[in-house]
Image (cartoon, rainbow, N blue to C red):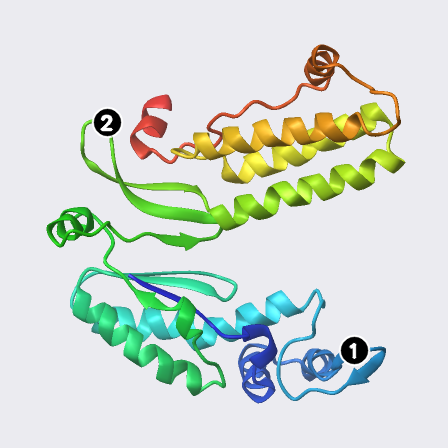
């Protein structure tokens, strides 16, 4: 498996190539001219606007769309039409924005892709982030091979989840996922910052309802199979953070712990549980 990251991608998008890609699919020059104007709008630093010859507009709603168009031609089509066809075994590719993974059945195919990838990106004005790019052994036999070498099987992080080699209750191989330490470490401070500010402007009931919505939002994404422990920890910490800052709305405590639990029941406080079952067999049985 090749785990790769593009260095400063949004700042390094080549305008000439971008315009070429757009004109390949868009025949209306009025649309193309409008996009070009947005590309050339520049960036603002210390109140001054500076023109740029590369990169997508910072903060623009068009930036994610343009970036996806760029990488569609640079990576997506290249992998499906060249890399996959030239691989000796199976090959798969996953991308979200500028983060992507390439998975291969054979090690030599992965090594070949890693070498060709750097040249491919350089041809379009991009570079790999060397410290975030690596080729690892992952899959059904990775655990056994690592144990023979006296090592632990490798894992990788993608889209906020740590993916690692695990086992089912019967001892069969299974890819397991849990919230990455980085994302969990970012989510709780964000919730704390929100609670600090909300206590000054929201009534207690509204603060409870909005806190519930935030916790539900977190669980809607992260509450998947094998991740119950990390989700339970998030709910536990978020509950206590909320209790702490609700009681700091004034000099007098708003809630005792018992009254706070009653308030949680009143707002239907979410409980940790699997919201997205990734076990295909269980899902088939349910239907």
The residue shown at (82%, 28%) is: 206
Helix, strand or loop at disc 1? strand
Question: Looking at this view, is 263 or 56 the one in front?
Answer: 263
Q: Which residue is mark 2?
A: 169
Task: Indicate the quadrant where residue 88 lies.
Answer: bottom left
Q: How many marks?
A: 2
The residue shown at (72%, 19%) is: 267
Q: Which residue is mark 1?
A: 44
Residue 140 % position (x, y): 19, 47
Question: Looking at this view, is 65 or 207 the one in front?
Answer: 207
- The answer to whether residue 100 shows anywhere in this view is yes
Residue 176 % position (x, y): 33, 40
Report the quarter where the N terminus lies. bottom left
Question: Looking at this view, is 28 or 211 the one in front?
Answer: 211
Counting other residues with Cα less than 10 Å from the Cα at mark 2, is it few (<14), some (14-19), or many (20 or more)?
Answer: few
- The answer to whether residue 209 shows anywhere in this view is no
The residue shown at (62%, 85%) is: 54
Residue 6 % position (x, y): 47, 72
Kindly identify which numbered label has been placed on residue 156: none
The tag earlier along the polypeptide, 2 or 1, is 1
124 vs 130: above or below: below
Residue 130 % position (x, y): 40, 74
20 vs 133: above or below: below
Counting other residues with Cα less than 10 Å from the Cα at mark 1, is it few (<14), some (14-19), or many (20 or more)?
Answer: few
128 vs 65: above or below: below
The residue shown at (14%, 52%) is: 145
Helix, strand or loop at disc 2? loop
């Amino acid at each position: 498996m090749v785990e790769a990251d593009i260095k400063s991608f949004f700042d390094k998008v080549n305008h000439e190539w971008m315009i070429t890609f757009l004109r390949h699919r868009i025949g209306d020059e009025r649309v193309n001219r409008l996009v070009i104007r947005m590309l050339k709008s520049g960036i603002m630093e210390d109140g001054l606007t500076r023109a740029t010859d590369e990169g997508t507009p910072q903060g623009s709603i068009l930036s994610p769309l343009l970036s996806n168009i760029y990488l569609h031609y640079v990576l997506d089509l290249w992998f499906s039409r060249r890399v996959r066809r030239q691989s000796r075994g199976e090959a798969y590719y996953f991308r979200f924005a500028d983060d992507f993974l390439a998975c291969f059945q054979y090690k030599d195919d992965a090594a070949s892709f890693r070498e060709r990838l750097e040249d491919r990106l350089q041809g379009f004005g991009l570079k790999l982030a060397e410290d975030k790019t690596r080729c690892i052994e992952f899959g059904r036999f990775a655990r056994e091979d690592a144990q023979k070498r006296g090592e632990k099987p490798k894992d990788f992080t993608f889209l906020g989840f740590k993916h690692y080699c695990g086992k089912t209750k019967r001892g069969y191989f299974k890819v397991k996922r849990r919230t990455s330490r980085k994302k969990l470490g970012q989510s709780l401070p964000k919730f704390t910052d929100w609670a600090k500010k909300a206590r000054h402007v929201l009534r207690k009931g509204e603060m409870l309802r909005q806190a519930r919505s935030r916790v539900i939002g977190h669980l809607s994404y992260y509450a998947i199979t094998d991740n119950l422990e990390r989700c339970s920890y998030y709910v536990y910490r978020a509950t206590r953070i909320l209790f702490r800052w609700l009681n700091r709305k004034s000099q007098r405590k708003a809630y005792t712990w018992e009254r706070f639990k009653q308030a949680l029941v009143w707002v239907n406080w979410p409980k940790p549980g699997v919201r997205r079952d990734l076990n295909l067999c269980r899902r088939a049985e349910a239907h």
